Image: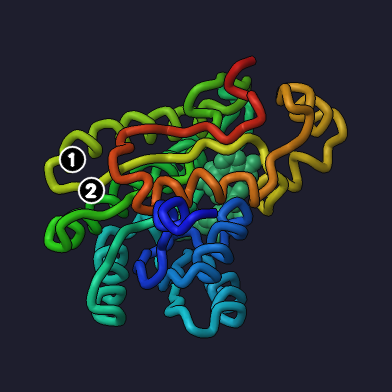
């Protein structure tokens, strides 16, 4: 790659707060960002997972934060700033996926899914925006899903939360465009992670999932890295309000 092309994806020294940092989908992205010299603050609600990523990324600051706790998220932003003296953006990969017929879905399960996937995304963005304004701009990137567009039976909570996320991304993008803050999402197709492995152990579910993806395979964590580097790097400076589907054609079906 020429130096000019490489500069489009240059993230060295950039500081990003990550929520849901132990996410399987975001695994390859976190590894790539670290390898490219970005400085990450890794947070997740699961203390055991935080311990695991802290052991892998010894140079990163890692601590437990629940994205649905507004005060805790603000505290995470402050700790990021205290650690590095600046923040260039946030990456949110926190998520829950309850799949259940709507008639029998426990209302508490529905609410918790919306709380994490939608309200959490809002709280995370909102906590970072004042700092990014002061910095003269920044990047917010959410891991959404093809479910912000497609309608799978039994996905009311998940699809509702991700559909809402697509709209929040558009609204926040407009609100903060004057401050050079971009707000975007990536919508991956079904990927084998701790979120999906139980469902995918059902051969019928697995076969249907693959069959629904025109490119004939599930997503891999590596698939989202290219789009994320674009959205987080200098090359993405004029892209905002978008959900970019990285889905082997799933949203075409
Ligand atoms: N796996 C898929 O098929 C798939 C497809 C499309 C989109 N996604 C999305 O990708 C994102 C990551 O999912 P994944 O598949 O990697 O699952 P995952 O279970 O591996 O990761 C999700 C992470 O979010 C964390 N988390 C859950 N609740 C949280 C909270 N309240 N606060 C902070 N962290 C919290 C979990 O501890 C976990 O580490 C999710 O938003 C998911 O909706 C996943």
- Residue 181, given in percent of the width and then of the height, sits at 23, 48
Please report the residue visible at 56 percent of the width from the left and 63 percent of the height from the top: 32
Q: Quadrant of the N terminus?
A: bottom right
Residue 90 figure quarter: bottom left
Residue linked to disc 1: 177
Place of residue 108 in the rendered image (x, y in percent of width and height, measured from the top left): 47, 41
Give left or right: position of 174 versus 198.
left
Label drawn at residue 181: 2
Q: Judge whether residue 135 can be spotted in this image.
A: yes
In the rendered image, residue 125, in percent from the top left (x then y), is placed at 28, 50
Question: Viewer-proximal residue, 53 or 12?
Answer: 12
Q: Nearer the viewer, residue 184 or 124?
A: 184
Label 2: which secondary element: strand
Residue 96 showing in the rendered view: no
Do the numbered discs 2 and 1 sit on residues whose CB atoms are within 8 Å? yes
In the displayed structure image, the side of residue 62 where residue 77 appears, left or right: left
Residue at image coords 43%, 48%: 116
Horizontal and vertical percent position of residue 178: 12, 42
Checking the image for residue 62, the label placed there is none
Instruction: Residue at the far right: name it.
Output: 203
Taking the image as shown, residue 51 lies to the left or right of residue 69, namely right
Considering the image in quadrants, where does the C terminus appear?
Answer: top right
**Quarter holding residue 238:** top left
214 to the left or right of 150? right
Rendered residue at 23%/57% (across/down): 127
């Amino acid at each position: 790659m020429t130096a000019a092309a490489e500069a489009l994806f240059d993230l060295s020294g950039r500081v990003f707060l990550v929520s849901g940092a132990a996410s399987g989908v975001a695994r390859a992205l976190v590894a790539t960002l670290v390898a490219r010299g970005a400085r990450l603050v890794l947070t997740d609600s699961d203390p055991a997972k935080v311990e695991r990523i802290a052991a892998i990324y010894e140079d990163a600051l890692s601590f437990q934060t629940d994205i649905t706790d507004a005060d805790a998220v603000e505290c995470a932003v402050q700790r990021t700033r205290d650690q590095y003296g600046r923040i260039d953006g946030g990456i949110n990969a926190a998520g829950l996926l309850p799949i259940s017929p709507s008639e029998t879905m426990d209302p508490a399960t529905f609410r918790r899914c919306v709380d994490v996937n939608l309200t959490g995304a809002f709280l995370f963005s909102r906590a970072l925006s004042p700092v990014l304004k002061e910095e003269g701009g920044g990047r917010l990137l959410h891991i959404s899903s093809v479910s912000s567009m497609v309608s799978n039976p039994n996905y009311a909570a998940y699809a509702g939360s991700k559909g809402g996320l697509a709209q929040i991304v558009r609204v926040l993008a407009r609100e903060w465009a004057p401050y050079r803050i971009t707000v975007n999402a990536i919508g991956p197709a079904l990927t084998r992670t701790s979120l999906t492995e139980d469902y995918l152990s059902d051969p019928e579910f697995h076969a249907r999932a693959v069959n629904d993806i025109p490119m004939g395979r599930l997503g891999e964590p590596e698939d989202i890295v290219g789009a994320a580097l674009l959205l987080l790097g200098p090359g993405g400076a004029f892209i905002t309000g978008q959900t970019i589907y990285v889905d082997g054609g799933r949203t075409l079906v």
